[in-house]
């Protein structure tokens, strides 16, 4: 699994699904290659969401995992750190919509969780 460098990302599609603690990104590099980056609650996290009332972001007590092109990324792996770095840069450069929008809020929650 390879991620493009931040400077090679030409276009981004992003979506915050209705499932809490989730964020989905599709990154397109200069060659038009598509890389899907998804962050979802783990099975344990889904059980926690069913048992307790969800509190709005930030909600860092819900365990979650990162997937790139539907492959699970090992927790604390260098690839996970690359994704967090890309997310930070996307927020910094206002590439995820309005700074107070839900996508930016969820992206910041993912950064806080995975750090």
Image (tube, rainbow, N blue to C red):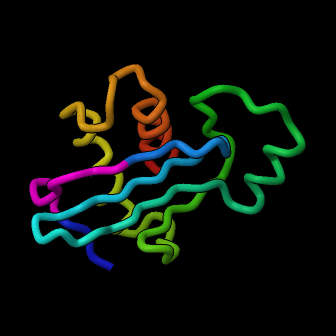
Where's residue 48, x and y in %?
81, 47
Is 112 left or right of 6, judged from the image as shown?
A: right
Residue 11 drawn in magenta: yes
Judged left or right of residue 94, residue 23 is right
Q: How many marks?
A: 0
Q: Is residue 111 above or below residue 68?
A: above
- The span picked out in magenta is 5-13
Q: Quadrant of residue 93?
A: top left
Task: Out of 92 and 16, give the one closest to the viewer.
Answer: 16
Residue occupying the point 22% across, 72% down:
33
Residue found at x 40% / y 54%: 25
Q: Position of residue 66 (x, y in %)?
A: 50, 62
User: Residue at (46%, 30%) from the top-left corner?
Assistant: 105
Residue 80 drawn at (x, y percent): 39, 62
Q: Is residue 8 magenta?
A: yes
10 to the left or right of 53: left
Viewer-closest of 12 and 67: 12
Image coords of residue 98 (percent x, y)? 33, 24
Q: Is residue 34 left or right of residue 9?
A: right
Furthest toward the right, the residue is 51
Residue occupying the point 49% across, 67% down: 67
What is the quadrant of the N terminus in the image? bottom left
């Amino acid at each position: 699994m390879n991620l493009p460098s931040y400077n090679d990302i030409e276009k981004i599609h992003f979506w915050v699904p209705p499932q809490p603690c989730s964020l989905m990104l599709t990154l397109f590099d200069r060659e038009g290659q598509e890389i899907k980056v998804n962050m979802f609650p783990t099975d344990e996290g889904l059980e926690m969401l069913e048992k307790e009332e969800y509190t709005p972001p930030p909600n860092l007590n819900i365990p979650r995992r990162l997937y790139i092109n539907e492959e699970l990324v090992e927790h604390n792996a260098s690839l996970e750190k690359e994704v967090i770095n890309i997310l930070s840069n996307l927020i910094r450069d206002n590439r995820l919509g309005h700074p107070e929008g839900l996508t930016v809020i969820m992206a910041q929650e993912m950064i806080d969780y995975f750090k």
